[in-house]
Image (cartoon, grey):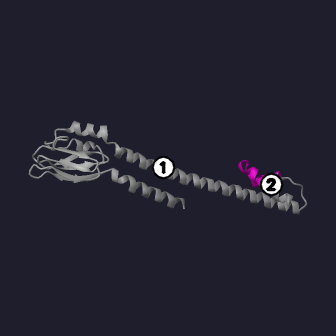
Amino acid sequence: MNTIKLGIAVLVAFTTVAPALADTIRCESSNGRENYCRGNTRGGVYLSTQLSSSGCYQGDTWGYDNGGVWVNAGCRAIFQTGGYNGYNYHSSNNYNSNYDNNYNNHNKNNSDGAVAAVALAAIIGAAVVASSSSKNKSNSADSYETTYNNGCNAGNKDRNAGKSRDYTRHSGSYSGSNEQAYSSGYNKCWSN
């Protein structure tokens, strides 16, 4: 049952957080006109590949908001969402000379992708800890109950055999960590 709960927690986490991590948006300005391309930009945006010979400069010929990317003045490009990527940031095209602006804008305003990844790790970690804790509590409760019942059975046998009440004669049947459970069961059932 705990494995099912863990699986559900991971599934919920991925369906909630994964959309904020990364997406690709192709946006093109035709005939110099502005074009708006919808997409998930919560994790930040950077120019991945410039497709036009016209310059693409963030804040001038392209930009983004919470709903997507805009381009104008002939800028045509493929944009990556989900944050800074060092490999694509220093892309090989010669048209995007505004690297520092892209990087600084992401660091200043758009850390949602990193936050989402940390949140996902926290959710998975919490689910694993909860599953482990639940399992340990269950094993602990089962161990106490089993030891208590063993003590009870020994108490019944001693009473029925006319022996004095002394659970310590069965010291090989319990360990120091579960002695209390054994003695409780023994004394309760020897008295009955």
Location of residue 146 with respect to 79 vertically, above or below: below
Mark 2 highlights which residue? 170
Residue 182 drawn at (x, y percent): 76, 54
Q: Of label 2 and label 1, which has the lower sequence position?
A: 1
Q: Secondary structure at mark 1?
A: helix
- Front residue of 39 and 133: 39
Residue 8 is left or right of residue 41, and the answer is: right
Residue 30 drawn at (x, y percent): 11, 52
Q: Quadrant of the C terminus?
A: bottom right
Q: Identify the amino acid type marked 1.
A: Gly
Tag 2 near tag 1, CB within 8 Å:
no
Image disc number at residue 125: 1
Q: Residue at x 26, y 39 (%)?
A: 105
Residue 80 is left or right of residue 15, and the answer is: left
Main structural element of the magenta stretch: helix, strand or loop?
helix
Image disc number at residue 82: none
**Residues drawn in magenta:** 168-187
